Amino acid sequence: MAESPKASEIRERARAWRDIMLQMTATIMIPLTIAGMGLYYTRWQQNVNDLKTMIDLVSDDKPERQKYGIAMFEYLLKNDKVPVEFVAAQLDYANNASDPQLLPAMERALTAAAQTNTNVQAVFKEAVGRLPSRVFVNVLNEQQRACFSKLLTGLKDTDGAAITVPSIAMAKWDGKVNEIRAMNDDDVPKAEAIANWLRNIGFDIQVVNLTNIWSGAKKVRPNTFEIWFGDKDLPPICTGKQAAIQSPPPSN
């Protein structure tokens, strides 16, 4: 049956309106898509530029520029613009930098950012977990300093990537026992492992958890420990009565 002229006209009008709507949609969506892609790329490029600028500032020899770079590091952390791999790389750089104040400054920036952005704390913990454990040693006299230096030489031969000792300092206290101090609950197992290594070579030492004892412990980065020599006899390895150092604790 042949189609009536009126039905044919209605069908043509519908096709025309459909074509017009498609053209209008394309006219609107294509610019929006291009604009969206452009905005995404612009933000991505800006983030990359911010990270590069921050690296240049942090690694600068001038303290003023370095200070500004650390402030920028904190700002980017607060806004979730620093991936964990990048945080780990920056901490590793600071951990090996000649400036002893760089790592504490970056750690303070991480701690401050964590108070605003809860995601930073998890990133901080994971990044620090990739670094060697830091052990700050405090001794009462030069004999104790020489003793631990000897122990440290044996440690570096077998486990230098797991433990690093930034300093062996003279410090007076009235302790009668040797202590290794952990700053938070999660670090107690590693403190026990280090203590066991020292005990195996005849160095009597106790593990102390400062989490609920010292309010300042929460400000210390994870995986950081302190060894305090007390008024105790030196181990045989330091007095020439023992020649071999046993294996150190396994790294976490």
Image (cartoon, grey):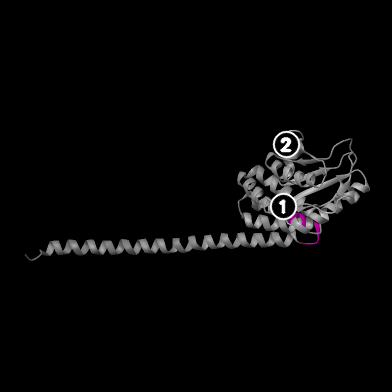
The image quadrant that residue 7 belongs to is bottom left
Most extreme residue toward the top is 213
Please check the rendered image and state whether residue 64 is part of the magenta-colored stretch, yes or no: yes
Q: Nearer the viewer, mark 1 or mark 2?
A: 2
> Which segment did they paint magenta?
60-72
The residue that mark 1 highlights is 71
Secondary structure, magenta segment, majority class? helix
Q: Which residue is mark 2?
A: 211
- Using the image as rendered, state which of residue 180 and residue 13 is in the foreground: 180
Q: Residue at x 89, y 37 (%)?
A: 173
| Label 2 residue SS | loop
At x 44%, y 60%, the residue is: 32
The residue at 90%/40% (across/down) is 172
Position of residue 48 measured from the top left corner of the image (x, y, whole percent) = 62, 62
Q: Is residue 96 visible?
A: no
Say which residue appears at 75% left-offset and 57% top-offset: 158
Amino acid type, residue under disc 2 in the picture = Thr
The kind of residue tagged 1 is Ala
